[in-house]
Amino acid sequence: MLPRPGALSAAKLPFDMLGIGMLMLANCALAVLWPSLLTSVAAFALFVAMAWRLFLASPGATVLLLPFVIIYVSSLASMIAIEGGAYMKEIGRRGVASPASAAFAVTVTLFLLTAAVVHLRQLQKRPFAMPLKYLLSPRPFVLAWGAVLIVGFVDLYLLMAGLRQGFPLLTGTDRFEFRRLSADILTLNFLNQKFLFSAFLGAGATFAASRQQRFWHHAVFLGYLLLSFLFGDKFFIILVAAAFYAMPLLIKEPKHIVRLVRQHFLTAVAVVACVFAVTVYIYSGYGTLSPEATFLKVGDRVAGQGQLWHVAVQDASRLVAFNVETVRLNIENLLANPASDFTFHHRLAAFYFVERYAPSAMYESFLNNAGMVTPTLVFEAYALVTFGYLGLLFCVLAAGVLAGWAFTWLARMLMSGNPFNVLLPAYVCLQVMSLMSQATLYSVIGLSAFKAYGAFLVLQLVVGILVRPPRAMQQGAIA
């Protein structure tokens, strides 16, 4: 019997979510009048409650947006540390109680709800359909084993590179130092495209024709995660990769998502605990630091997640603003080659904050890593200092529309039965995430991005031609 895909729920969002939103606004008002650690904790709790209610209202939409949810939960946890007085070493300030956490919870909630509504409306107009041609048995070899062979080669290459040069986790080398000084171009790209490879493998596993095929997809993915650990990738990077891998497995049967989540909850907790333990081990200097020093180092890193938004709210809280020069340079940046050098030399996006605050620790961090590592969570902070709160509202809503469209496209391709169809939309989604992380427009619509889009499109077309069945078999479709 052919597998039948489920359709994501297109039900309207429940009204009690409006109540949580009102509590968020009330928490913002309280944070403006009497900022305290309590309003920061409340912002974290209210956002988690909103994410949970979104999951119950539309599990499919929440699964697609889970990478953002993970990042925002970690950012709000970071802001609790900051507003509790943690030292932000890259900014050169100590955190203080402020409205930043409360305002951030509202901001990212607007983004997520906008993306979810766009996703649901697209499904209402055109529900998912499964092309029969990709579900014929036996499946063409390239569809059945393509993802395993390609990512298996990636695993083998990373293993050989690590054995040859040393794994950063085992040698105690900073992962960014390794990437700048030792890693070759293939190793860099294989590590940087982690979410793309995860979605690719997940799509292959979802429509595997046998338990053996599914086992090898799982095994190759676990090997990829293990190698990523050995190359120093941290806690939330691994969690987001796992979210991309699980997407097609979950949205294939949307009616059972809640049951599946509950069924595998303890397993997920155990995996998260293991990932967190490895992360703590990395920050302990690979077991050389005392518990107190490790805790302090982890605290410094946690504080780094939300530092730019914190200082933007502290120093640039304006209702209306429009920095003409910044806008002009960001538009010019779209045509620059390479765009990353233009961003660095003109102090755009994250580098704006280096120029403004310029403590030596942060400046040297950029220089030592050749501009390859920058603070995260830049989009909201950069939009605030450039356009004020009204402009930030417009930017967040526009980004929500873009994310909703991109991840719905990804979901359609995840359900197409052809894992190679996933590569182009997955790469676009990664560029949208880069936009949200680094506030660089060229990530989505720059020259280098369109070169990559073209390459993935050609690969997808070639595979589509190779696996095309007889015309008579292409007429059927399972809605």
Image (cartoon, helix red, strand yellow):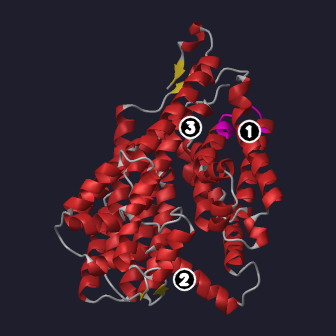
Q: Which residue is mark 1?
A: 148
Which quadrant of the view contains residue 143?
top right
> Gap between marks 2 and 1, in whole Å?
39 Å
Describe residue 396's horizontal placement relative to residue 424 as left or right. Answer: left
Q: Which residue is mark 3?
A: 423
> Gap between marks 1 and 3, in whole Å?
14 Å
Please provide the residue range marked out in magenta.
Answer: 204-211
The front one of 150 and 272 is 150
> Gap between marks 2 and 3, in whole Å?
36 Å
Residue 310: x, y in percent? 37, 78
Q: Amino acid at mark 1?
A: Val
Q: Is residue 315 above or below residue 47?
A: below
Describe residue 236's horizontal placement relative to residue 114 as left or right. Answer: right
Q: Residues within 10 Å of mark 2 (few under 14, many from 20)?
A: some
Q: Amino acid at mark 2?
A: Asp
Residue 197: x, y in percent? 63, 45
Residue at position x 62%, y 9% in the image: 470
Would you say residue 9 is visible in this rendering?
no
Does the stretch in magenta take in 217?
Answer: no
Residue at position x 33%, y 47% in the image: 401
Describe residue 328's horizontal placement relative to residue 410 as left or right. Answer: left
Q: Amino acid at mark 3?
A: Leu
Secondary structure at numbered mark 2: helix
Would you say residue 396 is visible in this rendering?
yes
Q: Which residue is mark 2?
A: 300
Mark 2 and mark 1 lie on one chain; the one further toward the N terminus is 1
